Amino acid sequence: MTTSSQCVTNSALVDVGRRRWPRRVATVLTVAPLLRDRIIAWSVPTGTPQRRACDRCAAPIGLDRPLRPLTPVARCARCGGRAGAPPLTVEAALIAVLVLLWASGLPPFELAAVGAWLLCAVPLGFIDVAVHRLPDRLTWPANAAVALLLGAAVLWGPADGGGWLRAAAAGAGLAACFAASALLLGQRGFGLGDAKLALGAGAILGWLGWGALVFGLFVTFLAAGLAGVVGLVAGRLRWSGHLPFGPFLILGVATAVALLG
């Protein structure tokens, strides 16, 4: 039976959460231009210099320039052409991440690990859709943050070492499977960028448990399969075409955290 003191405590926590939402939304509005800047800069083929200007009119784009391309409008300040990710999409993705983390109920270090990985995953997903690549400048920091923060959860949190070992085994195993596919099957398999992204993804899913790993991969491949079928039916994808896998892996991790975290 719920006591009156428990009701008061729960009500106070809800009030605190409501008061913090304006601050959280302001954080999203601050972070979004930084991510949009990286999406524009790194949405280029491998070996190509970073994009620093509009492809149409060569107007410079950056945090020290007119910010219109980096706002939810996502338009060049000079010619009005589309710049980077579609309007409002980066902001919507960040809000979704914020809601997911708020609702997950994870302990602080685990929450920080998932949050750091997802913060890198947002621009990675947009870049993968645009040019079918996952830059090391985002995948490796994401993986390092997951490893360090989950390690901190063992050292200074309530978690035990078994969870970290399971996470390490899941991450290494999933990355190895993806890398083997890339090496053996070439363009018909996963990319090496997918393997690097899978390292952190597998670690997060493994930390949540073997069941979470299976569930997250099930959601990943189900979503990828459905997207492939829709693309073929709509004529947007050929049988020999390549579907960017990063966004589906990110979706699988997010879904597992939301439902099993």
Image (cartoon, rainbow, N blue to C red):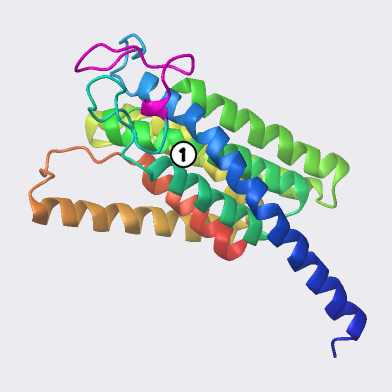
Look at the image and give the residue range highlighted in magenta: 53-70
Query: Percent position (x, y) of residue 181?
Result: 34, 35
Residue farthest right in this picture: 5
Q: Which residue occupies 43% across, 51% down?
A: 251
* Residue 69, quarter of picture: top left
Query: Percent position (x, y) of residue 187?
Result: 23, 30
Query: Is residue 220 positioned above or below 119 on the image?
Result: below
Query: Percent position (x, y) of residue 36?
Result: 43, 30
Query: Percent position (x, y) of residue 68?
Result: 38, 27
- From where the camera sits, is residue 190 visible? no
From the image, tell me which residue sits under label 1.
122
Query: Is residue 216 positioned above or below 41 on the image?
Result: below
Overall secondary structure of the magenta stretch? Answer: loop
Q: Is mark 1 on a helix, strand or loop?
A: helix
Which of 190/258 is in front?
258
Q: Which residue occupies 35% across, 37% down?
A: 73
Q: Quadrant of the N terminus?
A: bottom right
